[in-house]
Image (cartoon, rainbow, N blue to C red):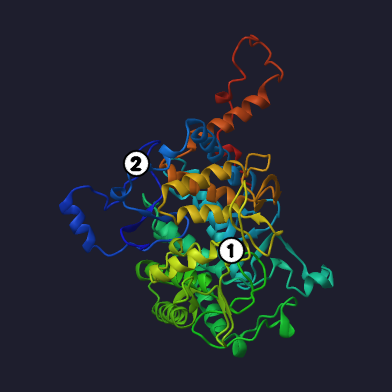
Amino acid sequence: MLGNGWRLEELPRADKHQRRASDDDDDDGEKIQKKKKKKKKKASSVLTVLRPKPSLIETKNNERSLLSDQERAELRQLCGRTLYHSLQTAVRPRGGRGQDAVFVATGDIDDMWIRDSSVQLSVYFPRVSQRPALRRVLEGAIRTQAFLILQDPYANAYSADWRDASKLPKSDRVIGRGGFVATRNYELDSGAYFLNMLWNYHRARPRPFGAERFLNDTELFDAAALLVKTWTVEQRHEELSPYRYSELPRGGKGPLSAFTGMSWSGYRPSDDPQRYGYNVPVNMYAAGALERALEINAEVWKSPEFAREASRLAGEIRAGIEAHGVVEVAGDDGTRTKMYAYEVDGLGGVLRDFDDPNVPSLLSVPLLGYPHFDPEVYAETRRRVLSSKNEHYFEGTVLTGLGSPHTPTGYVWPLAVMVEALTSDDAEKRANALKSLLKAQCGNGLMHESVHHSEGSACTREWFEWANAMFVVLYEDSLRERCDAEAEGNRLAEIGKRETGTAVIPGVASSDPMADPLFYESLEAQIHFMP
């Protein structure tokens, strides 16, 4: 049964080829017995993933042994290309108010999503001790996220620059654009990603100097408190919500819903409108995020009001998931079984046998830091959404996995392939997922939003940093090695190409190795800090 013999552990922090180790990882029998008595470590998404204990993995049948030398080399190079791609192309730090603010574009759309930016930067947390300048990027991005949430907690994407709403076209104004708001498709998971960014920073090891002082920033706490208030209002969307969006039915209010304890959301993580008001995996993620925010509050903020309101909200969301999010379905043998619904409305409306490849998703439940999920219900849910019962499940010669109504029919999302592998205890399936992603680079050596299941050259969004970051997570978790050396090698190679054939410095012999990239700028110099 999925869940037995599993633990939550952080991504690899060891040197290349060195096996990961967590604080409680020890082969000694006595220590293993003591470990069982320890309280389960709560986990955030992305930086922590669910993996079987080392004792359950046969060394003769692990991911590395199922990949050829050539495949491992190509995967290592792909990880090297994606690791610092966001840092070099999408991150724009700038000074402001005596502190740094960091804008993180999602890729070919020059706006910042709280969700996407959190994942894009998450892979840098374990690397701060080696590259201290990354701390400035991470802290600046967290500050920016807090500032943007305070501008409008219902927005899902934000612009780099302030815009006067009165000077925008009516078509923009009526959907809430203006100020820093780029799109106002309210997505509950967006704020949950911010709370998890705070928790990832809080739990970073080695602990950054002055970490508590940073987390005690008024703006960070105010943003977290505003999210709790907003999510509480949206528990009773029909009676209390001020949110309206012109694309939603019933005068912008969205489909009719009733109180369930869960928090309402208008849009999925894909930016598509929800069919029903309560997205179950998103509420799982939000409940887990609240529990982690309560940990921060207990140790840093120490606000009784926040503790009271966040605790009540987390408990009601969890109760709502258990009461409304688990539904009965007919099994293949005709018996009744249970699965998680994707969306419900509290009035009997249920969207089942469906999942969306964006995270949070039903497939990603073990990665959401929600320890209350039922492993048996999840296993049945997983089986059904990864089958023909889900009309957006596609099989092909390039990729097999989840597609989305957001993209053309027959297009599989690499994100979903990665999540399927990260939540699997089958080494062969994980290895096959890695092999398939090598065929899904769409000609530019990166990951993408979606790729046609049988035509690797047909894709959507050629520049999609969320998928690039998630590939790093999958690679490092599966092969238990980092790809920093490949990333640095790629960077130096680009410098070498740039400098080859340039003018020779006067007075220096032409045979002097001035094309050696080690003469030139560091990675930190390529971060676009602005005064």
Closer-to-camera residue (521/14): 14
Q: Earlier in the sequence, mark 1 or mark 2?
A: 2
Element assignment for label 1: loop
Q: For the residues marked 1 and 2, what is the alpha-carbon distance in whole angstroms?
A: 38 Å
Q: Which mark is residue 67?
A: none
Residue type marked 1 = Ser
Tell me which residue sits at (21%, 63%) in the image: 37
Instruction: Please rate how many residues cluster around mark 1, counting C-alpha atoms within 10 Å: few if below 14, some from 14 to 19, many from 20.
Output: few
Q: Which mark is residue 388?
A: 1
Identity of the residue furthest to the left in this view = 30
Q: Position of residue 213 (x, y in %)?
A: 42, 60
Q: Position of residue 132 (x, y in %)?
A: 46, 43
Q: In this rendering, would 245 be left or right of 447?
A: right
Q: In this rendering, would 37 be left or right of 95?
A: left
Q: Which mark is residue 19?
A: 2
Mark 1 near mark 2, Cβ–Cβ under 8 Å? no
- Using the rendered view, name the quadrant where residue 408 is placed: bottom right
